[in-house]
Amino acid sequence: MTTGNVPARAPVGGSAADQAMVVRPAGRLRGTPALPGDKSISHRALLLALLAEGESTIAAAGDGEDVRTTAAIIAALGAGVERTGVGGGRVDYRVVSPGGAALTEPEGVLDCGNSGTTTRLLAGLLAGRDLFAVLDGDASLRRRPMGRVTEPLTRMGAAFAGRGGGALLPLAITGRRVLTAIRYDTPVPSAQVKSAVLLAGLAADGETAVTESVATRDHTERMLRARGIAVEETTGPDGAHTVRLDGPVLPAAIRETVPADPSGAAFWLVAGAAHPDAELRLEGVSTNPTRRAIIDILRRMGASIEEHDRPAPGGADGEPLADLVVRSSDLRGVDLSPADVAAAIDEIPVLALAAATAAGTTRFRGAGELRHKESDRIAGIAAGLTALGARVRVEGDDIEIQGGAPLRGAVTETHDDHRLAMTFAIAGLIAGGETVIDRPGSAAISYPGFFHQLEGVRA
Ligand code: S3P
């Protein structure tokens, strides 16, 4: 274990020095890959620690580049941030903050790197603080839509200036100490948009309400409750989900333990199910109902996944946890609705790989949001899997994969997108011959040590 202060943000993966990686097929897969701490929860734990006056501790956070980005930013906003332990792709933080009413106006631009979650949640947090800040990021982040948060936050009283009428980074924010509470219907189901409005709602006078057509991941809601804030949730007869909170209010400082990331576990679940001789164990994974779609969809495809609940819910937020065991399975194609796709939004690239190895056809319907992730994931999945010999058809926002064609090694392009890099690496364990991952370094965005684990599971 090493300790120290939060380092300057590490360079985003996929730098000029990023070497191509060759992955050869594995004869057998066995083992218990060490998973990173959940990225969504790690970001939120740091941002809420900034708002909470006093000392917060965050154990077993993800130590990928995105979470380091958020740690460096809360330090620039006035928090003392110390890395008190590091190991196995996890990090423990101690954060001491003056609290949301006494943040420091940052001297320079806040570099959000590759992280959409950092940018959008921070926009919500800063909207209700009495300071000026500029957010910027890498080439990928500068292409991603920010109007989806600046539009409601402007209605709440914050002022934004940015390219494309405030829709693209770099983005200048002038916050206000007291915002106007709004009722907001999100145009796309997005936990980032919901969370941005709720974080701004902490500074709004009265009740802020966010309604989405399908419920997205609920970490912000759980984590605010664990920090003493009343958050109400209701579901309408049409499935629309509304979250409400009353401001102004600030979260309390607490001790937090972060569960293992189901989106990191997803790569091993697919590797284990699709490989002909595999048994992999994944420990302490969050099985939060808003995150577990990857498990349930793979089971619908015929995957053998044992789930052993851990008796006490993990961490202060009461996330349900389980140890998972996945074994070689005969996968079959499934039809996935837009709600299925939204529920497994970060796992669609690796689910597309599962579909390519399955018997029959898999349809991903209404997957348009994938075009707005770290890269255009519809194009990236289609190109990479097609190069590997899969039969992929894209029609509008739908992806159709006819499974069963044997995969053969090829050169795959990651577009510096961590989830594409890891998906094609898992494909390399299954495909015949050599699979080349062009620019694999982005894996460190969410899963430092992934390629080490990839060698470790070869039995
Ligand atoms: C995240 C929400 C999702 C997801 C992202 C993390 C979060 O984005 O894709 O990786 O932590 O809130 P959207 O909510 O924009 O779909």
Image: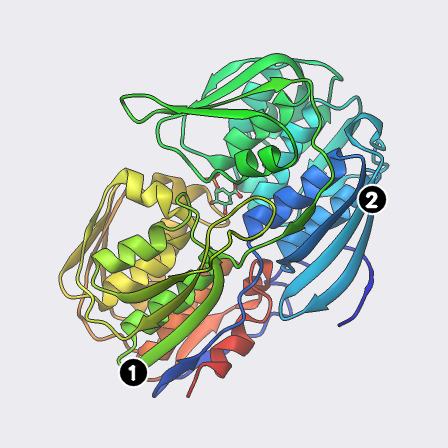
Q: Position of residue 424 (x, y in %)?
A: 40, 68
The answer to whether one can see residue 358 in this image is: yes
Q: Residue at x 21, y 59 (%)?
A: 301
Circles 2, 1 touching at the beta carbon (< 8 Å): no
Q: Residues within 10 Å of mark 1 (few under 14, many from 20)?
A: some
Please give left or right for residue 348 compared with residue 166 in the image: left
Q: Residue at x 40, y 82 (%)?
A: 30
Q: Residue at x 47, y 46 (%)?
A: 373
Q: Is residue 51 above or below residue 234?
A: below
Please give left or right for residue 156 compared with residue 101 in the image: left
Kindly report which numbered mark, 2 or 1, lies closer to the viewer in this rendering.
2
Q: Tell me the distance, in whole angstroms, between the alpha carbons under discs 2 and 1.
A: 48 Å
Label whose residue precedes the other's in the sequence (2 or 1): 2
* Foreground residue among 403 and 433: 403
Q: Is residue 209 above or below residue 69?
A: above
Quadrant where the N terminus is found in the figure: bottom right
Name which residue type carries label 1: Asp
Q: Position of residue 99 (x, y in %)?
A: 80, 32
* Foreground residue among 88 and 421: 88
Please give left or right for residue 41 compared with residue 307 in the image: right
Q: Which residue is mark 1?
A: 277
Q: Which mark is residue 96?
A: 2
* Foreground residue among 45 and 151: 45
Q: Residues within 10 Å of mark 2 (few under 14, many from 20)?
A: many
Q: Secondary structure at mark 2?
A: strand
